[in-house]
Image (cartoon, grey):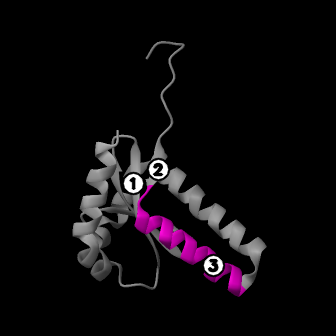
């Protein structure tokens, strides 16, 4: 790469499912622990998604549980994602006590459809 060129930062895209998950997590956190804690928790989830976008290979450590997708921990949740040309597409954010394998098996067709839609938007 030439000296003046800079690589564009990796980004994360949120599927509709992920947006709904984030809203649910925020609402439940605010009810349980207050707005300040909910704000910090959501900021931490977003930080985990940015880190996964920058280092998507991190998700392969837990891929045995999230196949065919990738997954990283984010405090008490997992961020489940797939690779897209722009970076990653966050498919869902699930609490770590959930049966991730069953959830992914049930939602895989809709996840694939959403990822393909995001890839076409490029």
- Report if the CB atoms under discs 3 and 1 are less than 8 Å apart: no
Q: Quadrant of the N terminus?
A: top left
- Which numbered circle lies on residue 56? none
| 106, above or below 43, in the image | below
User: Residue beneath label 3, please?
Assistant: 27
| 117, above or below 85, in the image | below
Q: Secondary structure at mark 2?
A: strand
- The reply to whether residue 72 is in sight is no
5 part of magenta stretch: no
| 79, above or below 55, in the image | below
- Report if the CB atoms under discs 2 and 1 are less than 8 Å apart: yes
In front of the other: 80 or 26: 26
Q: CA distance from mark 2 to mark 1?
A: 6 Å
Q: Residues within 10 Å of mark 3 (few under 14, many from 20)?
A: some
24 part of magenta stretch: yes
Q: Residue at x 26, y 67 (%)?
A: 110
Question: Which comes before the other along the chain, label 3 or label 1?
Answer: 3
Determine which quarter of the picture holds residue 100. Answer: bottom left
Give the prevailing secondary structure in the magenta stretch.
helix
User: Residue beneath label 2, please?
Assistant: 12
Q: Is residue 6 left or right of residue 116?
A: right
Q: Is residue 30 left or right of residue 98?
A: right
Q: Residue at x 66, y 69 (%)?
A: 41
Q: What is the x, y in percent for residue 18?
A: 45, 66
Q: What is the x, y in percent for residue 97?
A: 45, 85
User: Residue beneath label 1, please?
Assistant: 89
Q: CA distance from mark 3 to mark 2?
A: 22 Å
Question: Which comes before the other along the chain, label 3 or label 2?
Answer: 2
């Amino acid at each position: 790469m030439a000296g003046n060129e800079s690589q564009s930062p990796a980004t994360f895209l949120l599927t509709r499912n992920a947006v709904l998950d984030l809203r649910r997590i925020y609402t439940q956190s605010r009810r349980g622990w207050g707005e300040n804690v909910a704000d910090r928790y959501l900021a931490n989830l977003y930080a985990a998604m940015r880190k996964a976008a920058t280092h998507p290979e991190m998700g392969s450590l837990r891929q045995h549980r999230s196949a065919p997708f990738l997954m990283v921990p984010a405090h008490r949740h997992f961020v489940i994602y797939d690779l897209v040309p722009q970076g990653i597409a966050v498919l869902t954010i699930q609490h770590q006590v959930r049966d991730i394998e069953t959830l992914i098996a049930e939602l895989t067709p809709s996840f694939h459809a959403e990822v393909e839609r995001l890839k076409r938007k490029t």
